[in-house]
Amino acid sequence: MKKPNLKKKLTQNTKLVLQVFQSTPFDSFDVYMIRDYINKDRQMMSQRTIYRAVERLVETGEIVCIDIINGTRKYELAKANYCTFICRKCGKEKHLEIKKISELHKKIYKCYDFHVNSSLFRIYGECSHAC
Ligand SMILES: [Zn+2]
């Protein structure tokens, strides 16, 4: 089965929001942070436009919602081939590249008839030494 090409229909504003995520691939953003980031260069974009762009990027699998804090969603760039380890005590993050992710996707497709278009691996724990 062929993947539907959702990426080609991104608007200029949506691409601009995507660039915010791409500029720091391991950081997470909520819509307010995106708005501040974009508007600091006097490129005025309304919150509504940013909301729409974020929704679109979630739809296309470019970004994923990683957390909801006080009702505000935080998003991160979908890095299918990375696993993030997060310390519950100090909040420090480490990233590990998963080399054979496409094999996992193939297996999921073969065994579960399910097409993966984005994935997020987050593992929570604690640093082994005092942090
Ligand atoms: Zn720690």
Image: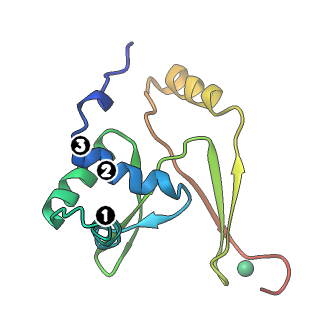
Name which quarter of the figure residue 59 lies in.
top left
Task: Provide residue 105's location: percent of width, then percent of height.
Answer: 56, 29
Q: Residue furthest bottom?
A: 130
Label number found at residue 16 = 2
Q: Residue at x 69, y 72 (%)?
A: 125
Tell whether 42 sits left or right of 121. left
Would residue 64 be seen by someone viewing this image from the given angle?
A: no
Q: Residue at x 40, y 43 (%)?
A: 62
Q: Is residue 51 above or below residue 112?
A: below
Label 3 secondary element? helix
Labels 1 and 2 touching (C-beta < 8 A): yes
Q: Residue at x 73, y 76 (%)?
A: 126
Task: Provide residue 115's location: percent of width, then percent of height.
Answer: 43, 27
Labels 3 and 2 touching (C-beta < 8 A): yes
Q: Amino acid at mark 2?
A: Leu
The 10 Å Cα crowd at callout 1, few under 14, some 14 to 19, many 20 or more, is: some
Quadrant in which the N terminus appears = top left
Task: Provide residue 40's location: percent of width, then percent of height.
Answer: 32, 71
Label 1 secondary element? helix
Is 100 or 18 nearer to us in this picture? 18
Image quadrant of ligand 1? bottom right
Real-space CA distance between mark 1 and mark 2, rounded to the nearest whole angstrom: 8 Å
Residue tagged 1:
38
Q: Is residue 120 above or below residue 11?
A: below
Real-space CA distance between mark 1 and mark 3, rounded to the nearest whole angstrom: 13 Å
Is 97 or 113 nearer to us in this picture? 97
Real-space CA distance between mark 3 and mark 2, rounded to the nearest whole angstrom: 6 Å
